[in-house]
Amino acid sequence: MAKAGKRSRPEPSAPTSSPPPDGALFGIVVRAYGLWFDVRLRNEDRILMSTVRGSVKRARRGTDLVAVGDRVWVVDVGEGEGQIVAIEPRVRSLARLARHTRDVEQVILANPDQALFLFARREPEPHLRMLDRFLILAESRDLPAIIGLNKIDDPARDLPEAQAFLADYADLYPIHYLSAATGYGIEELKADLKGKVTVVAGPSGVGKSSLLNRLDPDGERIIGEISDATGKGRHTTTSTILYEIGEQTFVADTPGIRALALQGVTPEQLPECYPELRPYLGDCFYSDCTHLHEPGCAILDALEAGEISSERYKSYASLRRGDTSD
Ligand SMILES: Nc1nc2c(ncn2[C@@H]2O[C@H](COP(=O)(O)OP(=O)(O)O)[C@@H](O)[C@H]2O)c(=O)[nH]1
Ligand SMILES: [Mg+2]
Ligand SMILES: [Zn+2]
């Protein structure tokens, strides 16, 4: 877990295999249907519906062989179909343990560059504790997070209240105030998404679909429509779809992400997932301080001194106590 702004990572959208397999084309998996994968080619405006060549060895045991977001090399076999012949190493992934097998993870999305957590100003009412859980998910996976607050239809009326609502987060994460209805804030958001794969998550009804349509107004590049038009009747076995909203710019609508929130985060890791607590970690009297009640706790001192938001601290404390009711 690194502090925001200090991350350095390989560039996953560029090929790293050397040498590239003979005659193979580079692309990104935008949709998976069981044994079929839609591969969006990098330098051509085409998608190849692809299977995985039998000789491709399972490079990473215990994980999906190919997942949405993977960068792959694919051979064009004609009629819009392809064969995946090599898979680039994953930079990171969002994964859950598969339902029936304890030691195999199911990758929800490979190689996300960042996450956008979308809420609405109202209808539905935003819940900051849910936002905190999403942020913990991002922090624990070292995934940069962006907050979006939608339905700011009338900024003169809505913005002051919205900014007050998110005041505790203003110094921690980039925040976009948006209206998918009017287009407010969309250009600034687009600039932050450019060239990246962004996973979007948020409660239903906040405007995720509306935002996607706004980001890609002509809809021509919406992958789902292209795939559905093939009429091959394949079944979608993963719910993640990468939408291309610009050159090398993808947005993933990932319904399953909410359940991941605290998965794999131990109580001891929790403080690291609150960026404003990090500067104090290591300064407590007890090295195994839980920051809940101990004397000589640097975080409780900072709370007392008003250096830490009491709401964010409450959020930490309730999750640390294992209280999952809020
Ligand atoms: N007033 C307002 N309504 C919006 C906005 N964005 C979406 N909606 C409405 O909110 C409802 C849910 O939107 P939808 O995109 O389906 O949300 P999703 O469930 O997150 O995909 C729909 O009735 C939209 O028309 C917005 O910026 N302002
Ligand atoms: Mg939707
Ligand atoms: Zn402490």
Image: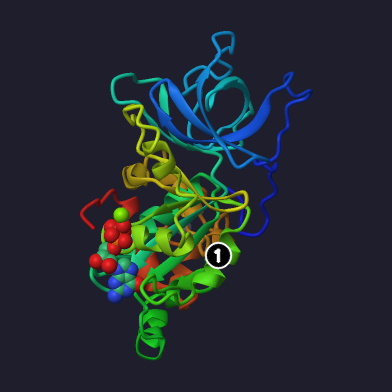
Q: Secondary structure at mark 1?
A: helix
Give the quadrant of ligand 1. bottom left
How many numbered markers are drawn? 1
287 sits left or right of 295 in the view: right
Q: Which residue is mark 1?
A: 190
Q: Nearer the viewer, residue 286 or 198?
A: 198
The answer to whether 81 is drawn above or below residue 204 in the figure is above
From the top left corner, tell me how far across and down residue 80 is, in percent: 53, 28
Residue with the most extreme top position: 55
Q: Residue at x 52, y 65 (%)?
A: 276
* Relative image position of residue 167 (x, y in whole percent): 44, 77
The quarter holding residue 224 reads top left
The residue positioned 36% from the left and 73% from the top of the image is 181
Inspect the image, locate mark 1, and give the three-letter code of the amino acid beneath it: Lys
Q: Is residue 242 above or below residue 21?
A: below
In the depicted structure, whether residue 318 falls above or below residue 236: below
Res 266 visible: no
Residue 57 is left or right of residue 186, and the answer is: right
- Viewer-proximal residue, 183 or 5? 183
**Residue 236: x, y in percent?**
33, 31
Q: How is the image coloured?
A: rainbow
- Residue 247 image offset from top left, x and y in percent: 62, 52
Does label 1 point to a residue whose CB lies under 8 Å from ligand 1?
no
Q: Residue furthest bottom?
A: 156
Residue that appears at 30% across and 64% down? 206
Farthest front residue in view: 79
Residue at 75 percent of width and 24 percent of height: 20
**Viewport quadrant of the C terminus:** bottom left
